[in-house]
Image (cartoon, rainbow, N blue to C red):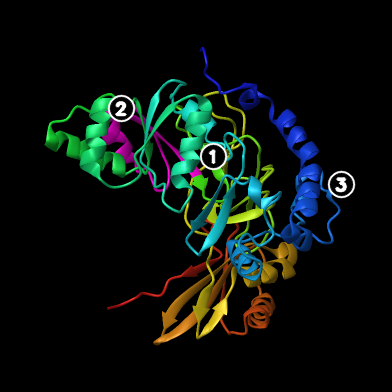
Amino acid sequence: MENQYFDELEIRSQEEREADLMARLPGQIAMAKAEASGWAKHLADIDPAEITSREALAKLPVLRKSDLLAAQAEEPPLGGFAAGDFSTYKRIFMSPGPIWEPQGPEADPWKSARAFHATGIRPGDIVHNALSYHMTPGGFILDQGARAYGCVVFPAGIGNTDMQVSAISSLRPTAYAGTPDYLKVILDRAAEMGADVSSITRGLVSGGALYPSLREEYANRGVKVLQAYATADLGIVAYESEAMEGMIANEDFIIEIVRPGTGEPVAPGEVGELVVTTFSPTYPLIRFATGDLSAVMPGISPCGRTNMRLKGWMGRADQRTKVKGMFVDPAQIERLRKQAGDDIGRARLSVVRQGEQDHMILKVETEAASDDFIAALKKSLKEHTGLNGDVELVAPDTLPNDGKVISDEREVTA
């Protein structure tokens, strides 16, 4: 099919892609350390030349938004994590936190052009972009990619629905870009106004969940809508194709799925936290923890794109929970699990109410079963968390594969 793929990179072998990414990784780390003081501190003991495999990459510390917040407060505005001369940046954004993000001089700094292509949008199409252009980079992430790809963009932003309907009626755009639910607001309002917005036949949405029922409603109204997973820091990390079987990882990203609260990769298919490394020359992010849960799907997409597929957004990874006035962190449970060695598989801490008090139950997958083993786990739980709790042994592969290390099951009553 003509123009089925954005470029040949999307259909190269997985081995070729992996070799390319790993060959480029040492240079990216070296650049970050040389040009950004924050990275020089964060990776002070790291020799970039040694980071040539996923196994080596996994030994580097993750960078969390909380780390960025602290660094930016200490060294405003960017905490030393952006490379190059400040005067070369095109824009500076402020996301909730606040966290500041730079926009570099690249034509498509957030790598969104591929997502537009996969959605069926083509150069010359008019894109009605209804993501916010105010303070945060959302609107610009899609705007820059669409224009770099050769589309014409109407920067609608958010709100003023009647005016947006009028603009669509006049400009006759073929594509919508924005949040999943706002397109329905536009279509419903157009119906009330008797306005013709039927020119829109494609949609690229992000910033929220595209529920199957909503996707079906759009299809019934003549609009094919696909979604992308993006963050303000990284841009478009993964996107759907017309196969609609998972989200395909964007080129130029190294994606890892790690156990929440740690930086350790999980087994293939297991749910964990999404950690991303970029090759941005302006805002190099190395093992950046998104705080979002996902999992890798086996195989390649039926559309023929060969990059890894993600199951999409599956919740938040931050499971730090207060129990009896003390915070319990997933990293503590992971240390306990590792200390137990090969005797246990997954471990999950359930927090419940028992006799009007907080109570912990550590559930572990194991084939071992003895009073001494349970006693040792109880002792380890107290050592790692400072709190007492019960231990429940379950059969291997029976705990839910949902990325949860701590499950807060306390009922909240009015």
Q: Which sits earlier in the primary sequence, circle 2 or circle 3? A: 3
State left or right for residue 103 relative to residue 188: right
Q: Is residue 29 visible?
A: yes
Q: Which residue is mark 3?
A: 49
Q: In the image, what residue type sits under mark 2?
A: Ile
Relative image position of residue 64 (x, y in whole percent): 62, 61
Residue 200 — which label?
2
Is 226 magenta? The answer is: yes
Label 2: element kind = loop
Residue 238 — which label?
1
Q: In the image, what residue type sits under mark 3?
A: Ala
Q: In the image, what residue type sits under mark 1?
A: Ala
Quarter holding the C terminus is bottom left
Q: Residue at x 39, y 44 (%)?
A: 131
Q: Residue at x 52, y 35 (%)?
A: 112
Q: Residues within 10 Å of mark 3 (few under 14, many from 20)?
A: few
Which residues, given as a range, are shown in magenta? 201-229
Q: Which sits earlier in the primary sequence, circle 1 or circle 2? A: 2
Q: Residues within 10 Å of mark 1 (few under 14, many from 20)?
A: many
Q: Which sits earlier in the primary sequence, circle 1 or circle 3? A: 3
Relative image position of residue 130 (x, y in whole percent): 35, 41
Q: Residues within 10 Å of mark 2 (few under 14, many from 20)?
A: many
State left or right for residue 214 relative to residue 144: left
Q: Residue at x 46, y 46 (%)?
A: 138
